C-alpha cells in the first residue's frame, strides 16, 4: 500500500516479477527490499480494479476502485534497522516524531489546533481585533506565579520570561489601540500536571471600555472603553465560531452561556470550575443535624456540614462495595486523612429503618432537604468543613464528588457524559483577595493575603471600592472565568485604570515592599497618562484544544510537549550549562 504525503489516502500497489518489462521486475525487487514507512517516489500506470470491500486501511481512506501497476520505485531515504514500526508499536516521548507520524488521531489533533487558530484569527480580524506582538524578554515583576529568569552578560541583570502579556497589553490600551489580541507564549515555573506546561499558549485580548483577553498557548485579548459584559459577549461569539466551524457538524450552543457566582459554585459543586455534566449538587445541612451527630463526624468547633447525594446503583450492596473499595484505594486516602473529619457515608436501603438513614436521627428525617432524600442504592455523603467564607479553588467534598463520578464511570456503574455534551458556564464575583499560602508566592507582600488572580483586577462595584478602606478581604473582583466541563478555559477581568487606586493596592492593601512597587513604576506612569477603562481575557489555548479534541492531557494537543518534570525528552532539554557559559553570565552553582 502507498500512502499519500498527507496520509489522507492510500492506494494499492501492484508489482511482480512477471509484470511488464525489466523495469517492472526491478521495481518489484526494490519494493520487496523496503521497510514499511520508507518515503518513496513511485511511477506507474493507474488502472481500474474491482471495488475493494475494505474502505479504510489503518484509519486512512482507501482508493478502492483503482490501483497502480508499478514501473519504477525511487527510495527517498532509508529507515534505520533499529526502528521497527508496526501497528501495535508504542513509541515513547523521546521519539515524538514517530508518535506523530504513526498515530493518526494524535496528528489530526495537532492539525485541528492549527485549523482552530486560523479560524480564530479570521473571526477576530473580522470583528476589528488587531493582532499585535509583545516582547518575550520582559522584567521580573510579582504578578503571582514563579518566573523563568534569563541572565544577561551584564553582571546581576536578568530578563524574565512573561507570565502573560498583561502589562504590555494594558500599555497598548493607553496607546490608542482599541482591540488587541495575540496568541501569546507564556511562561510560569509551576508544578506540572496533565493540564499544565511550563510554557503555554494564551489568546489574550483587550479593548478600551473594558473588554476581553483571550489565551493562546494563551489567546490573549484586551479591549479599551469596555467592561465585563463586552468581553464576555465577544468571548462567547469566538467560542461559538470555533465550535461551529472547527467541530462541525455541531448543534447550536446556548444563545447565552450560563453564569454562576463563585460562592454559589463553591457551595453547590465544591469547585470554582464546576463540571455541570454531573447533576449531583451539594447542600449545607448543619441546621438539620444534632450536635451529637456533628461531634461524631468532626472535631471542628462550630463547623459547616455539607451533604451530597449520588446515584450509583439501585442495589445497596453494589453501592456499598463500590464506595468501600474507592475509600480503601490510594485515591481515597486523602479523604480519610482529612483533618476536618472523614466523610460520613450513608446508603439508601429500603429494607432498613429510615431507608438506611437511621444514624442521622429523626430531626434530619423530618427537616432534611427533599433533594437529598435517597432512593434505593443512592449514596449520601456528609462532610464537615470550617464555617468560614469560601476561598481557593475547591472543597474536599467537591473533589470527592468528581472522584466518585469518575470512578463509577470507570467501573461501568454510571454512564459517561456524551462526547458532544458541552456545558459552558461563566464563574463571576470572585474574592478580590485570597489568604496567602507557602505554595503561592502571590505579590510577596506582608498583608497576609494576595490578589486572587493578579493585582491589576478592579473591584466590581463602588461598594467594593469602599471596602478597600474598611475590609479588603470581603471585596468582590470584576473577574470572570469561562469554564467548560470542569476545565477552566480562561479568565479575565476589568482592569484598574486609575494609577492612584493601583498604587494604593500595591502599597496599602498588599503591603508590597517599596522596591517591588517600583518594579511596576512603568505601568503606574502609563495609567497616569489618561489610560481609558479597559478589560480583557486570556484563553488557555492548550486546554481549549484538549477539550475540543476530547483529550485528557494538553500534551496530546502540543506538537512537542514537556514531560511531567519539564523536560523535552526528544531534544534532551534542559541541558547542563558549561563552565564557559556560567562564567559568561556571571553565575555560580550552589550545592
Image: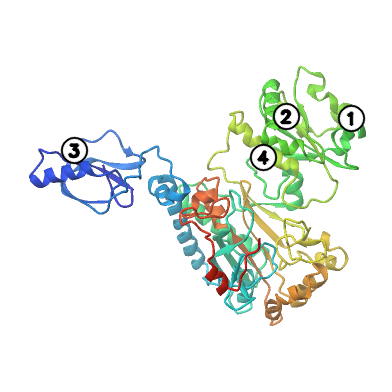
- Rate crowding at label 2 as few (under 14), some (14 to 19) or many (20 or more) other CA atoms within 10 Å: many
Could you say whether the residue bearing mark 4 is in a helix, strand or loop? helix
| Residue 49, numbered label | 3
Q: Write down the residue under mark 1.
A: 363
Spatial separation of the CA atoms under disc 4 and disc 2: 14 Å
Image color mode: rainbow
Spatial separation of the CA atoms under disc 4 and disc 1: 29 Å
Spatial separation of the CA atoms under disc 3 and disc 1: 80 Å
Q: Write down the residue under mark 2.
A: 379
x then y, percent, for residue 388: 85, 49
Does residue 431 appear in this view? yes
x then y, percent, for residue 100: 41, 49
- Rate crowding at label 3 as few (under 14), some (14 to 19) or many (20 or more) other CA atoms within 10 Å: few
Please, which residue is most extreme toward the top here? 351
Please, which residue is most extreme toward the left here? 21
Q: Mark 4, mark 1: which one is toward the viewer?
A: 4
Judged left or right of residue 256, residue 265 is: right
Please, which residue is most extreme toward the bottom here? 529
Spatial separation of the CA atoms under disc 1 and disc 2: 20 Å
Spatial separation of the CA atoms under disc 3 and disc 2: 61 Å
Is the residue 409 above or below the residue 516 in the image?
A: above
Judged left or right of residue 91, residue 287 is: right
Amino acid at each position: 500500500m502507498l500512502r499519500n504525503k498527507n496520509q489522507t489516502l492510500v492506494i494499492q500497489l501492484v508489482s511482480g516479477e512477471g509484470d511488464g518489462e525489466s523495469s517492472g521486475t526491478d521495481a518489484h525487487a526494490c519494493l520487496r527490499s523496503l521497510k514499511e514507512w520508507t518515503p518513496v517516489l513511485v511511477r506507474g500506470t493507474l488502472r481500474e480494479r474491482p471495488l475493494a470491500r475494505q474502505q479504510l486501511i489503518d484509519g486512512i481512506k482507501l482508493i478502492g476502485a483503482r490501483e497502480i501497476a508499478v514501473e519504477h520505485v525511487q527510495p527517498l531515504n532509508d529507515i534505520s534497522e533499529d526502528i521497527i514500526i508496526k501497528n501495535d508499536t508504542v513509541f515513547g516521548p523521546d521519539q515524538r516524531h514517530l508518535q506523530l507520524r504513526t498515530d493518526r488521531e494524535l496528528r489530526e489533533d495537532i492539525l485541528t489546533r492549527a485549523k482552530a487558530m486560523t479560524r480564530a484569527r479570521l473571526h477576530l480580524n473580522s470583528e476589528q481585533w488587531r493582532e499585535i506582538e509583545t516582547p518575550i524578554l520582559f522584567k521580573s515583576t510579582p504578578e503571582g506565579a514563579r518566573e523563568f529568569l534569563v541572565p544577561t552578560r551584564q553582571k546581576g541583570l536578568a530578563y524574565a520570561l512573561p507570565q502573560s502579556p498583561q502589562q504590555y497589553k494594558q500599555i497598548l490600551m493607553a496607546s490608542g489601540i482599541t482591540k488587541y489580541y495575540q496568541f501569546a507564549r507564556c511562561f510560569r515555573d509551576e508544578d506540572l500536571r496533565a493540564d499544565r506546561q511550563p510554557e503555554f499558549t494564551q489568546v489574550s485580548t483587550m479593548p478600551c471600555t473594558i473588554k476581553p483577553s483571550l489565551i493562546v498557548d494563551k489567546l490573549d485579548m484586551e479591549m479599551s472603553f469596555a467592561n465585563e459584559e463586552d468581553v464576555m459577549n465577544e468571548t462567547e461569539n469566538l467560542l461559538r465560531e470555533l465550535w461551529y466551524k472547527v467541530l462541525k457538524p455541531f448543534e447550536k450552543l446556548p444563545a447565552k452561556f450560563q453564569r454562576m457566582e463563585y460562592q454559589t459554585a463553591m457551595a453547590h459543586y465544591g469547585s470554582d470550575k464546576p463540571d455541570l455534566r454531573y447533576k449531583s449538587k451539594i447542600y449545607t445541612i448543619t441546621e438539620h443535624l444534632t450536635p451529637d451527630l456533628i461531634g461524631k463526624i468532626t472535631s471542628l468547633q462550630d463547623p459547616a456540614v455539607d451533604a451530597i447525594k449520588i446515584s450509583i446503583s439501585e442495589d445497596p450492596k453494589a453501592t456499598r462495595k463500590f464506595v468501600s473499595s474507592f475509600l480503601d484505594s490510594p485515591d481515597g486516602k486523602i479523604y480519610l486523612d482529612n483533618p476536618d473529619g472523614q466523610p460520613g457515608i450513608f446508603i439508601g436501603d429500603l429494607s432498613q429503618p429510615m431507608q438506611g438513614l437511621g444514624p442521622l436521627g429523626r430531626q434530619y428525617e423530618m427537616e432534611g432537604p427533599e433533594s437529598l432524600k435517597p432512593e434505593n442504592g443512592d449514596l449520601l455523603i456528609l462532610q464537615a468543613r470550617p464555617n468560614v467564607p469560601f476561598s481557593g479553588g475547591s472543597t474536599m467534598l467537591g473533589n470527592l464528588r468528581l472522584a466518585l463520578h469518575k470512578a463509577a464511570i470507570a467501573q461501568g456503574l454510571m454512564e459517561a457524559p456524551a462526547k458532544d455534551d458541552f456545558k459552558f458556564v461563566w464563574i463571576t464575583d470572585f474574592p478580590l483577595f485570597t489568604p496567602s499560602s507557602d505554595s503561592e508566592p502571590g505579590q510577596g507582600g506582608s498583608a497576609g493575603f494576595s490578589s486572587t488572580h493578579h493585582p491589576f483586577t478592579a473591584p466590581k462595584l463602588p461598594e467594593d471600592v469602599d471596602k478597600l478602606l474598611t475590609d479588603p478581604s470581603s471585596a468582590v473582583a470584576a473577574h470572570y472565568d469561562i469554564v467548560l466541563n470542569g476545565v477552566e478555559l480562561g479568565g479575565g477581568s476589568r482592569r484598574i485604570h486609575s494609577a492612584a487606586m493601583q498604587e494604593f493596592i500595591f502599597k496599602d492593601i498588599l503591603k508590597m515592599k517599596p522596591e517591588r512597587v517600583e518594579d511596576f513604576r512603568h505601568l503606574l506612569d502609563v495609567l497616569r497618562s489618561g489610560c481609558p477603562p479597559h478589560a480583557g481575557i486570556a484563553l488557555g489555548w492548550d486546554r481549549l484544544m484538549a477539550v475540543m479534541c476530547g483529550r485528557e492531557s494538553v500534551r496530546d494537543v502540543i506538537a512537542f510537549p514537556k514531560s511531567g518534570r519539564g523536560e523535552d525528552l526528544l531534544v534532551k532539554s534542559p541541558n547542563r550549562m558549561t563552565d564557559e557559559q556560567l562564567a559568561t553570565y556571571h553565575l555560580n552553582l550552589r550545592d
